Image (cartoon, rainbow, N blue to C red):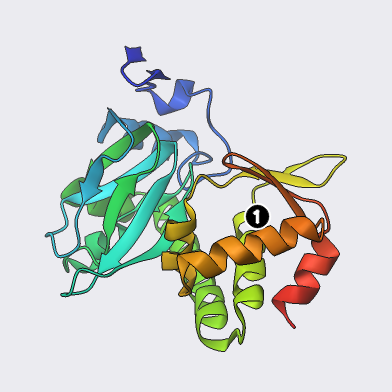
Amino acid sequence: MHAPYDLDLVENCMACHMRKEGFFCQLPHPAMDALGKVTYASAYPARAVLFVEGQSPRGVYVLCRGRVKLTMNSAEGKTLIVRIRESGEILGLHATLSGHPYELTAEALQPCQIDFIRRDDFLRLMREHPVVSSAVIRQLSERYRQACQEIRYLGLSRTATEKVAQFLLESSERAQETNQGKRFHLGLTHEEISQMIGISRETVTRTLSDFKNKKLILTSGPVVLIRNEPELRALAVA
């Protein structure tokens, strides 16, 4: 089915050509069939807001295609980017399980296909299909690991160089391996990077320029190529 924003909307998980290692993509047939009966596929444009911090949880959002930015805001209007979610991940999981309000705001960074599952349907799916509960546990475990990494470079990294190096390495976890190095789409402004790692935008710009001058990375628009990963890792733990 053709949808706006140059996306071909896929409404049947079993027939999806985008299936890969994701939250629901590798479920066995019975669970996948049950999933298809309770999901609502939608296309979202860039900058669309899926849910906002403090909103009562309506359900979970499975990110089938695209990238989503998760942020939290202070009473003074300061914004902190907590994480960038990639295709195959699920959004709003903790709030849906606990019944507490969404802790973060989710905003599309680019056109996305997102499958929505209402809270009651999702909880019933977990009860009736233990394999879904196992997938939820894996997802929560991965979130815990990521939170520990973020605390490490926010709280324990001593310099801006360490923080930016660690950020680039984490962002390259799904990078394409090439003869020149690891290539990935970052798609964040320097201001957004600064909001993620707790340093000024000017410091982000200066540090990235320094990395390029040292031939550690190469950038072309939103695309980043890590040319010297061992040296970048050495800087991340300096």
Horizontally, is 218 left or right of 101 in the view? right
Q: Residue furthest right?
A: 179
Amino acid bearing label 1: Glu
Where, by quadrant of the figure, is residue 161 drawn? bottom right
Q: Between residues 188 and 117, which one lies in front from this camera angle? A: 188
Q: Position of residue 96 (x, y in %)?
A: 23, 59
Horizontally, is 209 left or right of 136 in the view? right
Q: Can residue 134 be seen by looking at this rendering? A: no
Q: Can residue 155 be seen by looking at this rendering? A: yes
Q: Between residues 222 and 119, which one lies in front from this camera angle? A: 222
Q: Residue furthest left?
A: 56
Horizontally, is 8 left or right of 187 in the view? left
Q: Residue at x 55, y 70 (%)?
A: 203
Secondary structure, mark 1, is loop
| As drawn, 91 above or below 67 | below
| As drawn, 214 above or below 180 | below
Q: How many marks?
A: 1
Q: Residue at x 35, y 21 (%)?
A: 5
Q: Residue furthest top?
A: 2
The residue pinned by badge 1 equals: 173
Q: Residue at x 15, y 51 (%)?
A: 58
Q: Position of residue 105 (x, y in %)?
A: 26, 57
Q: Position of residue 8 (x, y in %)?
A: 41, 17
Q: Residue at x 27, y 63 (%)?
A: 104
Q: Position of residue 215 (x, y in %)?
A: 82, 55
